[in-house]
Amino acid sequence: MPTPADRTPTHGAVIVMGVSGSGKSTLGALLAEALGCAFLEGDAFHSAEAVVKMRDGTPLTDADRWPWLDRIGAAVAASIETCGVSVAACSALRRVYRDRLRAEIPGAVQFVLLEADRAQLLARMSSRPGHFMPTSLLDSQLETLERPQPDEGVLILPATLPPATLRDRVLAYLEQPALRA
């Protein structure tokens, strides 16, 4: 049976993406543990001003997101330099955001989109006490989300699956020879 190191891309990143409440952080942490690499929580890279905006129910603009994406990209690149591979959680809602991350990160970048319906997302968001993202911003995120196109090669999974099942599906996907950098 392959070990986690056998599954690890030799040089690159896995970005778990989706709207708030989809389970990005849970899956990202499980993947990083299985791959023996760093997990970077995208929320930790928001500016204090962006967190205040979101906490107050104001959707972020592209001007708010560009520096955030650049900080995530730089952190992932630094992690790859140290370890060879990194896992991050980042909403990456629009294709231009995904393209910006790809441009900032050396090596292969594999995105994994977690999808769930609005009711499931609201239930999950409501059960996260203390998180800065209010449920009032979910519709804004859903409207902003540009579903990945086939040419992007994004793995799309239902967020309703158990986290361990999601992890195992991503690991199996990463084992495909065409994805091993």
Image (tube, rainbow, N blue to C red):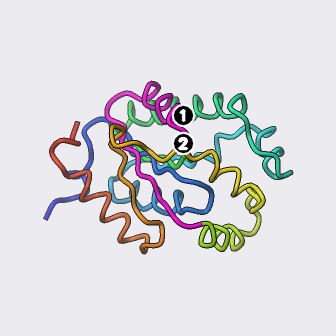
Q: Tags 2 and 1 in contact by the CB under 8 Å rule?
A: yes
Q: Quick one: 66 or 25, which is closer to the camera? A: 66
Side (left or right) of 120 relative to 26: right
Q: Hey, what amino acid is under mark 2?
A: Ala
Q: Type of residue at label 1?
A: Tyr
Which of the image's four quarters has the C terminus? top left
Q: Is residue 10 magenta?
A: no
Q: Which residue is mark 2?
A: 92
In the image, taking residue 43 as reference, residue 61 lies left or right, namely right
Nearest to the observer: residue 39 or residue 172: 172
Numbered mark located on residue 18 in the image: none
Disc 2 secondary structure class: loop
User: Does residue 87 sit above or below 77 in this rendering?
Assistant: below
Q: Residue 34 location in percent, x, y? A: 34, 59
Label 1 SS: helix
Q: Which residue of the protein is positioned furthest toward the top in this rendering?
A: 103
| Residue 49 locus on image (x, y percent) | 81, 38
Q: Is residue 53 left or right of residue 162?
A: right
Magenta-colored span: 94-117
- Name the residue: 50% across, 50% down: 17
Residue under numbered circle 1? 97
Residue depicted at x 13% and y 65% = 1
First of labels 2, 1 by sequence position: 2
Q: Locate residue 178: give its quadrant.
A: top left
Give the answer, above or below, for where 8 lies relative to 102.
Answer: below
